[in-house]
Image: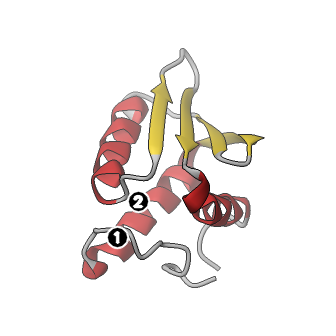
Amino acid sequence: MSDLAWVPQSCTLPTGERLLRVAEWDELFAEGLAAVSRPGPLRLRLDLTGGPGVEEQVRDLVEREGGCCSFFAFTVTPGERLTGLDIAVDRQHEAVLEALAARIAAGGPP
Protein backbone atom coordinates (compact mmCIF):
# COMPACT_ATOMS: atom_id res chain seq x y z
CA MET A 1 0.00 0.00 0.00
CA SER A 2 1.41 3.38 -0.93
CA ASP A 3 1.64 6.04 1.73
CA LEU A 4 -1.49 7.76 0.45
CA ALA A 5 -3.50 4.89 -1.04
CA TRP A 6 -5.77 4.69 2.01
CA VAL A 7 -6.48 8.43 2.24
CA PRO A 8 -10.08 8.98 1.07
CA GLN A 9 -10.96 11.49 -1.60
CA SER A 10 -13.18 13.28 0.90
CA CYS A 11 -10.06 14.42 2.79
CA THR A 12 -9.68 18.18 2.38
CA LEU A 13 -6.02 18.35 3.44
CA PRO A 14 -3.98 19.74 0.54
CA THR A 15 -2.25 16.92 -1.30
CA GLY A 16 1.20 18.37 -0.62
CA GLU A 17 0.61 18.12 3.14
CA ARG A 18 -0.79 14.59 3.21
CA LEU A 19 2.56 12.79 3.34
CA LEU A 20 3.60 14.93 6.30
CA ARG A 21 0.38 14.09 8.17
CA VAL A 22 0.74 10.38 7.43
CA ALA A 23 4.31 10.59 8.75
CA GLU A 24 3.04 12.19 11.97
CA TRP A 25 0.62 9.31 12.51
CA ASP A 26 3.31 6.75 11.70
CA GLU A 27 5.69 8.37 14.18
CA LEU A 28 3.04 8.40 16.91
CA PHE A 29 2.32 4.71 16.36
CA ALA A 30 5.99 3.73 16.11
CA GLU A 31 6.95 5.54 19.31
CA GLY A 32 4.11 4.65 21.59
CA LEU A 33 1.60 2.08 20.41
CA ALA A 34 1.00 -0.37 23.25
CA ALA A 35 -2.19 -2.08 22.07
CA VAL A 36 -4.76 -2.06 19.27
CA SER A 37 -8.26 -3.50 19.39
CA ARG A 38 -11.38 -3.45 17.22
CA PRO A 39 -14.43 -3.12 19.48
CA GLY A 40 -16.54 -3.10 16.33
CA PRO A 41 -16.27 -2.75 12.56
CA LEU A 42 -16.62 1.04 12.81
CA ARG A 43 -14.30 1.54 15.82
CA LEU A 44 -10.59 1.23 16.46
CA ARG A 45 -9.10 1.50 19.96
CA LEU A 46 -5.44 2.43 20.46
CA ASP A 47 -3.50 2.55 23.71
CA LEU A 48 -0.45 4.79 23.51
CA THR A 49 2.44 4.94 25.93
CA GLY A 50 4.87 7.72 26.38
CA GLY A 51 6.14 10.42 28.62
CA PRO A 52 4.96 13.91 29.27
CA GLY A 53 3.24 15.60 26.39
CA VAL A 54 1.81 12.49 24.71
CA GLU A 55 -1.79 13.39 25.49
CA GLU A 56 -1.26 16.91 24.15
CA GLN A 57 0.44 15.53 21.02
CA VAL A 58 -2.47 13.15 20.41
CA ARG A 59 -5.07 15.89 21.00
CA ASP A 60 -3.27 18.25 18.62
CA LEU A 61 -3.01 15.61 15.91
CA VAL A 62 -6.65 14.48 16.14
CA GLU A 63 -7.87 18.08 16.13
CA ARG A 64 -5.99 18.77 12.91
CA GLU A 65 -7.08 15.44 11.41
CA GLY A 66 -10.71 16.12 12.26
CA GLY A 67 -10.40 19.43 10.42
CA CYS A 68 -9.66 17.76 7.08
CA CYS A 69 -11.36 14.38 7.53
CA SER A 70 -14.54 15.26 9.37
CA PHE A 71 -15.88 11.71 9.06
CA PHE A 72 -13.52 10.61 11.86
CA ALA A 73 -14.77 10.82 15.44
CA PHE A 74 -11.88 10.83 17.90
CA THR A 75 -12.05 10.34 21.65
CA VAL A 76 -8.88 10.83 23.71
CA THR A 77 -8.85 9.27 27.16
CA PRO A 78 -5.94 10.27 29.38
CA GLY A 79 -4.59 7.78 31.85
CA GLU A 80 -1.78 7.43 34.33
CA ARG A 81 0.38 5.28 32.05
CA LEU A 82 -1.55 5.12 28.78
CA THR A 83 -3.42 7.55 26.58
CA GLY A 84 -6.42 5.95 24.92
CA LEU A 85 -7.46 6.93 21.43
CA ASP A 86 -10.78 5.74 20.05
CA ILE A 87 -11.34 6.30 16.36
CA ALA A 88 -14.83 5.85 14.93
CA VAL A 89 -16.27 6.31 11.46
CA ASP A 90 -19.64 5.99 9.78
CA ARG A 91 -20.45 2.98 7.61
CA GLN A 92 -19.53 4.91 4.44
CA HIS A 93 -15.91 5.22 5.67
CA GLU A 94 -15.47 1.72 7.11
CA ALA A 95 -12.88 0.90 4.43
CA VAL A 96 -10.79 3.91 5.51
CA LEU A 97 -10.75 2.66 9.10
CA GLU A 98 -9.88 -0.84 7.90
CA ALA A 99 -6.98 0.53 5.85
CA LEU A 100 -5.75 2.55 8.83
CA ALA A 101 -5.89 -0.56 11.03
CA ALA A 102 -3.97 -2.54 8.39
CA ARG A 103 -1.34 0.20 8.18
CA ILE A 104 -0.92 0.18 11.96
CA ALA A 105 -0.67 -3.62 12.01
CA ALA A 106 1.96 -3.53 9.27
CA GLY A 107 4.04 -1.05 11.24
CA GLY A 108 3.60 1.99 8.99
CA PRO A 109 4.80 2.46 5.45
CA PRO A 110 5.98 -0.58 3.50
The image quadrant where one finds the C terminus is: bottom right
Between 79 and 91, the one nearer to me in the picture = 91
- Distance of mark 1 from mark 2, alpha carbons? 6 Å
Q: Which mark is residue 90?
A: none
Is residue 81 found left or right of 60 in the rendered image? right
Mark 1 lies on a secondary structure that is: helix
Q: Residue at x 52, y 61 (%)?
A: 26
The image quadrant where one finds the N terminus is: bottom right
**Position above or below: 10 against 93:** below
**Position above or below: 69 against 14:** above
Is residue 17 found left or right of 32 in the rendered image? left
x and y percent of residue 65 in the render? 35, 53
Q: Which mark is residue 20?
A: 1
Q: Residue at x 36, y 40 (%)?
A: 57
Between 22 and 40, the one nearer to me in the picture = 40
Q: Residue at x 62, y 39 (%)?
A: 46
**Position above or below: 79 against 63:** above
Between 63 and 48, the one nearer to me in the picture = 63
**CB under 8 Å between callouts 1 and 2?**
yes
Alpha-carbon neighbours of circle 1 within 10 Å: few (<14), some, or many (≥20)? few
Mark 2 lies on a secondary structure that is: helix
Is residue 12 found left or right of 1 in the rendered image? left
x and y percent of residue 104 in the render? 65, 59
For label 2, the residue is 24
**Position above or below: 58 against 12:** above
Residue furthest out toward the top: 80
Q: Quadrant of residue 92?
A: bottom right
Alpha-carbon neighbours of circle 2 within 10 Å: few (<14), some, or many (≥20)? some
Which amino acid type is marked by label 1?
A: Leu
Which amino acid type is marked by label 2?
A: Glu
Q: Quadrant of residue 80?
A: top right
Q: Residue at x 57, y 34 (%)?
A: 49
